[in-house]
Image (cartoon, helix red, strand yellow):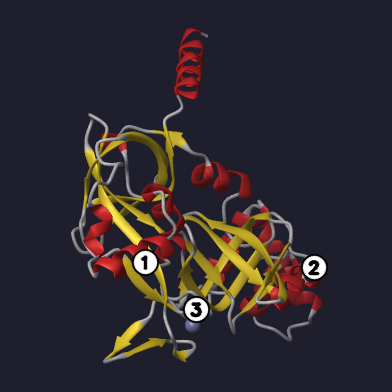
């Protein structure tokens, strides 16, 4: 429960009223209910009528920056930044559909991916940009590009009608989804940035890891068995992760390429990489004659702090070759903006 002072403060802040006006509204409400409620009770009703949320954040409720792969029972409140179109697909002779909602808060953005039956919730609940939604019992996995993705699974999504203290969706989008070219020395934790740098080292460790073929979560090993927390014992699918170091002359940083991005870097599909490694019974064969070493790339990604080493690392979201024309055009634009 909030104290009377806290409720009054919240109402002032959200409704833009003076304390005097709020006190008057509360007194009027007390009178209207002819002494049936306490002053706190009347204040709650006033807040409620103004659409102000007095729900305390629960301990479970997370901020987006705290999401990590494999997290379950996720509860969070976020603002809808964007709702994608519905995409239909066919897999194993069955049709499915998927729709993505980009959610944000003051700490970051995350994609909520809705599948099949879940897709219709968007229409049912009339979810649109700028709405606030609450996710309960969701889970977090990595998508094909190594980005965190929120899924509902057996959890739920609901619209929050009260005023919740979150930045405007345009502010969140500007802060967390616009890509800026940066020098490695200027990268900070949480940045979503593009760098132009040479790949100077590739770590020769086993790049494959086991995932659940149904939900894509990373599997845990139990003796000879592979276990998904959701689906029990499964025959694993494989995903790939390649890491190394990039340097742009101003500094260097560890870089991690997951899944699609690793395939793009290697110039081979995961299937081809596995076949090659199995044939030679050695996964480090993939790094022999690796052409990318020493080559300069444009790499876009999110800067994270490695939990163990506490060093910054770039989780690559895309990698592409340098396009000289684009580079020149950007340079001209930059010079023009300087002379304005
Ligand atoms: Zn699973």
Residue 55 x %, y %: 58, 74
Residue 174 x %, y %: 55, 41
Q: Is residue 319 above or below residue 101?
A: above
Asked where in the image residue 292 lies, by quadrant, the reply is: top left
**Neighbour tally class for label 3: few under 14, some 14-19, many 20 plus, Cα within 10 Å:** some
Q: Which mark is residue 123?
A: 2
Mark toward the start of the polypeptide (3 vs 1): 3
Separation (CA) of disc 3 from disc 1:
18 Å
Asked where in the image residue 11 lies, by quadrant, the reply is: bottom right
Between residue 89 and residue 51, name the one nearer to us.
Answer: 89
Between disc 3 and disc 1, the foreground one is 1
Q: Does residue 232 appear left or right of residue 133 in this picture?
A: left
Q: Is residue 146 visible?
A: no
Residue 9 x %, y %: 56, 61
Q: Residue at x 56, y 61 (%)?
A: 111
Separation (CA) of disc 2 from disc 1:
44 Å
Queried on whether the Cβ of the residue with tag 3 lies below 8 angstroms from ligand 1, the answer reads yes
Q: Is residue 300 above or below residue 113?
A: above
Q: Does residue 285 appear left or right of residue 129 in this picture?
A: left
Q: Residue at x 25, y 50 (%)?
A: 244
Label 3 element class = loop
- Identify the residue position indicated by label 1 in the image: 275
- Identify the residue position indicated by label 3 in the image: 213
**Neighbour tally class for label 2: few under 14, some 14-19, many 20 plus, Cα within 10 Å:** few
Separation (CA) of disc 2 from disc 3:
29 Å
């Amino acid at each position: 429960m909030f104290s009377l002072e806290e409720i009054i403060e919240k109402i002032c802040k959200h409704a833009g009223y003076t304390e005097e006006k709020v006190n008057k509204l509360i007194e009027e409400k007390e009178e209207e209910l002819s002494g049936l409620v306490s002053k706190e009770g009347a204040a709650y009703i006033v807040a409620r009528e103004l659409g102000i949320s007095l729900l305390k954040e629960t301990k479970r409720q997370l901020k987006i920056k705290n999401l990590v792969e494999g997290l379950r029972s996720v509860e969070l409140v976020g603002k809808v930044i964007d709702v994608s179109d519905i995409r239909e697909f066919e897999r194993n002779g069955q049709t499915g559909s998927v729709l993505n909602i980009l959610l944000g808060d003051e700490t970051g953005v995350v994609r909520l991916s809705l599948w099949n039956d879940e897709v219709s919730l968007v229409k049912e609940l009339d979810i649109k940009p700028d709405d606030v939604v609450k996710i309960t019992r969701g889970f977090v996995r990595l998508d094909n590009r190594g980005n965190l993705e929120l899924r509902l699974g057996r959890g739920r999504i609901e619209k929050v009608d009260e005023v919740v203290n979150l930045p405007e969706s345009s502010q969140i989008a500007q802060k967390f989804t616009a890509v800026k070219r940066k020098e490695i020395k200027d990268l900070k934790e949480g940045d979503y940035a593009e760098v132009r740098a040479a790949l100077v080292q590739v770590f020769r460790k086993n790049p494959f890891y086991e995932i659940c073929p149904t939900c894509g979560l990373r599997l845990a090993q139990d003796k000879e068995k592979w276990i998904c927390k959701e689906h029990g014992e499964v025959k694993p699918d494989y995903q790939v992760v390649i890491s190394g170091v990039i340097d742009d002359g101003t500094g260097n940083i560890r870089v991690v390429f997951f899944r699609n991005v690793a395939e793009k870097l290697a110039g081979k599909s995961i299937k081809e990489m596995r076949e090659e490694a199995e044939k030679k019974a050695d996964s480090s064969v993939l790094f022999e004659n690796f052409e990318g070493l020493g080559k300069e790339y444009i790499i876009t990604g999110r800067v994270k702090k490695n939990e163990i080493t506490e060093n910054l690392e770039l989780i690559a979201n895309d990698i592409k070759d340098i396009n000289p024309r684009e580079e020149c055009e950007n340079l001209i634009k930059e010079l023009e903006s300087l002379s304005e």
